[in-house]
Amino acid sequence: MSEVRRERWNTRLGFILAAVGSAVGLGNIWRFPYLTAEYGGAAFVVVYIFMLFLIGMPVMVAEFILGRSAKKSPVQALSQPGENNWSGLGYLFVLTGLGILSYYSVIAGWALRYSLESLRGYLLNVSPGDYFAEIHSGFDALLYHFVFIAITTGIVLGGVKKGIERAVKILIPLLVALIIGLGIWAFFQAGAYEGYSFYLQPDLEAMFETYTLNLFGMSVSFPFLALGLLGAAGGQTFFTLSLGMGAMITYASYLPGNDDLMKKTIIVSFYDVGIALLSGLMIFPIIFSFGLESEIAESPLGTLFMAIPEAFSQVENPYWGGFLSFVFFFCLLLAALTSAVSLLEVVTSSLMDELNMKRQPAAAAGGFACLLAGVPAALSLGWLDVADQIAGSFLLLLGGFFLAIYVGWLMKGTLDELTHGLEWNLVVAPWHFLIRYIVPVALLALLTNFVWDFSLQLWEWLGGL
Ligand code: PFF
């Protein structure tokens, strides 16, 4: 078989920005604030950061190790000669990628539409709730989903250096600058302080629950971290760091052999948390300054799309309000675009490696599959919500669990690969312990919790029929 030379990142910074671009997305600006609001403000932030260290970063290191050592897309990386054949896990990754992109691009399509409508001043003159109800599904949602996928495919078609790396080098700095700008504006609003204190003070009641165990006729009650909060924080860690579906494996497969993978993990995670925290610093003051705190807890999915335009429509100068609203939704769009690129890259590179396809037809075929896969989410908000729970939480945790087993227990030469280019060898043993024991146990617990919760939801739903 003729080996086509594998593409490479042009620079180290290019890889870092692409990985940050994958991590920073709707998860930071849309999902993180609403989960924070739902689970008691800073209580959620504390647990989430803890999970990040305990399970998120170790899995990212594992993905980087696998990708860099195999220099292949996930399906082939998991079926290397001389190793166990786990290609099934690779296929699961591709399926999860398609599943996430199928609804991710619908939400990104809303963001695209909202930024255009803000620019022309229309958005601020309508009732945000009615407007959202009108555009979130049906033909309009389909159209913008198509346009978003077309833009994403355009970038992936350009290849690793000329498409992805070039795009993220412009888009990520722009995104950071815009979020900081909006954060500074929000700081000067009247209710900013209330927003910050909701966001930064842990609500201990939301953080702990009292559980009762019945043992031999005796009942024992004890406080422990709320399971709902733990599950949400675990799912968010995987979603926000783009773990459990091969995106980081694919990006690491374009790395040369001698970079410090641990350092890269720390940098990418630091940026990802930083941007999520910054988004909170921007959103909560806006929500509280304009008295919209009840809205954020009511409808998690539509929160930003209803509360934010309402806030900006109250800004005294309507042109300024329109501009700010444009900047906000444009940020959401940029963040979504760089993540969607990584999702589509997983599908594209798998088609290239598996079917020996060239990049252009592979990217076009992947984009087309995403167009079709997104149709149900564009037609139904209920479907979108379920797809987010299944692909965006459950399948990522499941993928992460099997990946930890594979890299931690089965793959040969894992530690050698990690130590290539590593500056600080002291971290190897703690990482190995985490990936072998802590990560699988924690993920199994999170998966069990998810299945239990989901069955209860299903039961309730069936009972309501
Ligand atoms: N990390 C992205 C976000 O926070 O929006 C979502 C995502 C991208 C998840 C890529 C998984 C993935 F592979």
Image: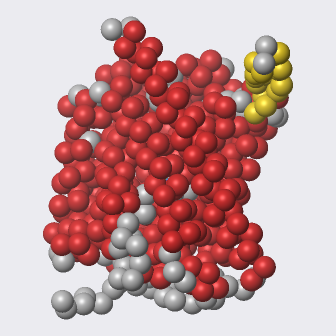
Q: Residue at x 51, y 80 (%)?
A: 412
Q: Percent position (x, y) of residue 99?
A: 33, 46
Left or right, 354 with respect to 124, comes to left
Q: Residue at x 37, y 14 (%)?
A: 462
Front residue of this view, candidates 131 and 152: 152
Does residue 227 sit above or below 107 in this rendering?
A: above
Q: Residue at x 16, y 69 (%)?
A: 361
Front residue of this view, candidates 410 and 78: 410
Quarter of the figure with the C terminus: top left
Q: Quadrant of residue 222?
A: top right
Does residue 288 sit above or below 247 in this rendering?
A: above
Quarter of the figure with the N terminus: bottom left
Left or right, 207 with respect to 227, comes to right
Q: Percent position (x, y) of residue 278?
A: 67, 49
Front residue of this view, candidates 398 and 158: 398
Q: Is residue 11 visible?
A: yes
Q: Residue at x 38, y 60 (%)?
A: 89
Left or right, 234 with respect to 174, comes to right
Q: Quadrant of residue 61?
A: bottom right
Does residue 417 sit above or below 121 in this rendering?
A: below
